[in-house]
Image (cartoon, rainbow, N blue to C red):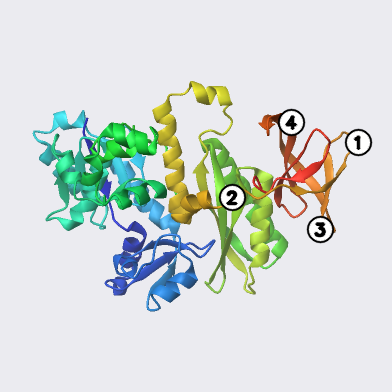
Amino acid sequence: MRFACLLVEHLPTRVEILQASSLRGQPVVVLRDWDGRVLDASPEAMTTGIAVGDTRQRVEQLCPQAVSLTANEALYQSHQVTLRNLLAQFASAVESGDWGELTIDISALARTFPTEDALALSLIQQADQITPLGPILGVASSKFVAQQAAWQVSEQAGRIMLVPTGGERHFLDPLPLKVLPDPPVEMLRRLHLFGITTLGGFAQLPHAAVVLQFGSDLAFYHDLARGIDPRPLVPYAPPPSLSRTLSLPESLSDRAMVLSGVERLATRLAQRLSDLGYHALALSLIVKTADRRDHSTGASVKPSSADSEQLRRLAGRLLGKLSFEADVINLTLTAYPLREWQHGARQLSLLDADVQPRLAQLRAAIRVLQQRFGEAIVRLASLVGPPLPLPIKVNLAPNGIPAVLGWGGWSRRVVNIYEYWRERQTWWERPTARDYYQLTIEDGTPFTIFHDEQQRWFLDRQRR
């Protein structure tokens, strides 16, 4: 098989520089509008130590002269979709990775061109016709090698790198271990203790020794270092964002009517998320007023959801956080979705699925999480122990369902219970059973509570 990876490095900052040429050569940082963290940074900014997911305060500490811009994810997504539509003319399955990274299988397509060079040149030429961002291309016999070839093109002459079949090891050997997709920190630490810092050094280890040292699951990384990538393309990765806009025929000054428009947008977004099988991780709201000013804010959705009522409530709270005096002429509500591929599936059906596709889907979900929230969102989680359950008081409704929660001297009325299940497990060799409820209280805050066999109630802070 042969794969091609089309890449626009730092697509968000490239798009911003394209909009304002005066930014060229400056350290540019693009910040998400809903949490103020770094979505992307130009190479000039990243040399100062700025990384995706950093806070605005850290950016100001590391690079005070950096130009900070609010992300326009709808604009970046339009460029991503343009590139995806181009590749869809060459292949039926297109995998979208990080911003500006798209991969296709060209095994069958290569037969219609006299040489692979001619195919690669045709892809680049057609990409140049639809975008001024100057994409580059990597071609190889596996997905991982093709993607790394694309990332290394900038270090080489030209904009195309072809890795011949059989030349994967020679190409990968000098690359650092950090190019592996989401490598476990403990694995990297042990390899560095052995003096191994490159893929070539890792690949030279006997495979049996790697399995013995790290386990069979992590032996997958050893295969990648040797140029072996069994992962299939994942063509249904979620889009970076979904937006809905409402242009008002007449400017509005009545907050109640503006709220009605925001809730209508939230309903439309929830419907679209449900149709696609996605859940929203965050919402952002932009209100454009008659004085041509944009007022924006955002918040995460906890737990991630496509529930219309939950998104309507959150959108209403976002509007309440904004302060403006001029009349409103335009509303834009954006959801940042993650496709929960396992949502609605039973455990047995997951076990029946093939292992490799499930691993590929899980890695795609983790990749999206890291793209949204930075590297620490996954890696630091393993360093934090789970919080202990908190004893609480629960008043039950006549039907036996939790109605009021109480702890810390406060009472919280339950307004919605959206999931219930029972768990049986062995705890210190004694079988236990717990009844769990996932619910929300009056202000929309979600909680998970449970009671044990002695009818003692607890707040499960690990699952909140």
Q: Is residue 421 visible?
A: yes
Crowd class of label 3 (few under 14; some 14 to 19; many from 20; radius 10 Å) = few
Q: Quadrant of the N terminus?
A: top left
Q: Is residue 238 visible?
A: no
Dot placed on the residue nearer the N-terminal end, 3 or 2: 2
Q: Which mark is residue 385?
A: 2
Nearer to us: label 3 or label 4? 4
Q: Residue at x 16, y 45 (%)?
A: 171
- Please say if the residues under marks 1 and 4 sit with CB atoms less than 8 Å apart: no
Q: CA distance from mark 2 to mark 1?
A: 37 Å
Percent coordinates x, y for residue 454 in the rendering = 83, 35
Residue extending furthest toward the right: 398
- Please say if the residues under marks 3 and 1 sit with CB atoms less than 8 Å apart: no
Q: CA distance from mark 3 to mark 1?
A: 25 Å
Nearer to us: label 1 or label 4? 4
Question: In the rendered structure, which amino acid carries the disc numbered 4?
Answer: Ala
Q: Residue at x 64, y 42 (%)?
A: 307
Which image quadrant for residue 167?
top left
Q: Which residue is mark 4?
A: 433
Q: Which mark is residue 408?
A: 3
Q: Which residue is mark 1?
A: 398
Dot placed on the residue nearer the N-terminal end, 3 or 4: 3
